Image (cartoon, rainbow, N blue to C red):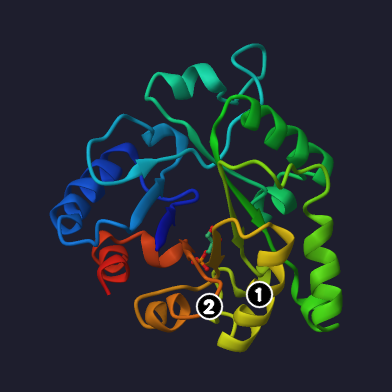
Amino acid sequence: MIFAANFKTNHTRRSTELYIEALNKKLGAKKAEDKVYIFPPSTALDDYEGEFTIGTQNAYPAHNGAYTGEIGVEQLDEFGIKTILIGHSERREYMAETQEKVAKKFTFFQEQEFKIIYCIGEPLKIREKGFEAVMQYLIAQFEGIDLEYENMIVAYEPIWAIGTGRSATVEEISTTHRALKKVINNKPLLYGGSAKPANIKEITSIAGVDGVLVGSASLDAESFSQMILS
Ligand code: 13P
């Protein structure tokens, strides 16, 4: 299983250090085949040691240059970071990242041979229209994305389940993942949206779920390690 922690705009450099110290004490007990990713805010990026991979939540598709406020490959190289989240619904919505921009970013980081966790997900009004509408919406989020890229993981995160405490049901996850797996040629597929210690077993038992992308419940090292070790 894959367990990925997306801190979003939470934690500082200091609290990330303490978090990793606490997590490292627990990770000795994890199964060898389980893989852990941590996406701290960019001010906390560093070359931490441990049984996990550090990734960036975002970066500008350039090595360096005049892109005020952004970080590029040069800043990630300093810490050996070769993993990135692309297409998260919060960036699509709040940072107005269109599918075109998301696809350009994907292509750039694919060329840099980054591991890409590519996020897709539908809003509630689409889910309410039914399964067909959901799949149509999700497939449109693959426009311009090379689904043959072997270093990619897909994360399905229904927007209405993010940060709401209400995860999608087993049935919703199961049917959506089954259909998505075909579209993505069986690439690893994570679920995200209110995953937490109380529902992790149920979610990771679903066929077609290869892991989870966790926001709120990953912010506390104890809670996240409980999920990994459950
Ligand atoms: P929550 O786990 O807080 O619902 O967030 C999910 C998410 O958006 C991870 O990228």
Pointer 2 residue: 207
Q: Nearer the viewer, residue 111 or 78?
A: 111
At which x and y percent is residue 31?
24, 62
Q: Residue at x 61, y 81 (%)?
A: 174
Q: Residue at x 60, y 74 (%)?
A: 161
At which x and y percent is residue 26?
17, 59
Residues at circles 2 and 1 in contact by the CB criterion of under 8 Å: yes
Pointer 1 residue: 178
Query: Amino acid under label 1?
Result: Arg
Work out which residue is located at the far top of the displayed protein and give it: 65
At which x and y percent is residue 106?
69, 37
Q: Secondary structure at mark 2?
A: loop
Question: Could you classify mark 1 by the number of other residues whose Cα lies within 10 Å: few (under 14), some (14-19), or many (20 or more)?
Answer: some
Q: Cα distance, mark 2 to mark 1?
A: 8 Å
Query: Amino acid under label 2?
Result: Ala
Q: Nearer the viewer, residue 7 or 115?
A: 115
Q: Locate residue 227: give its quadrant.
A: bottom left
Q: Residue at x 77, y 79 (%)?
A: 127
Q: Locate residue 120: give its quadrant.
A: bottom right
Return the mark for residue 25.
Answer: none
Quarter containing the N terminus: bottom left
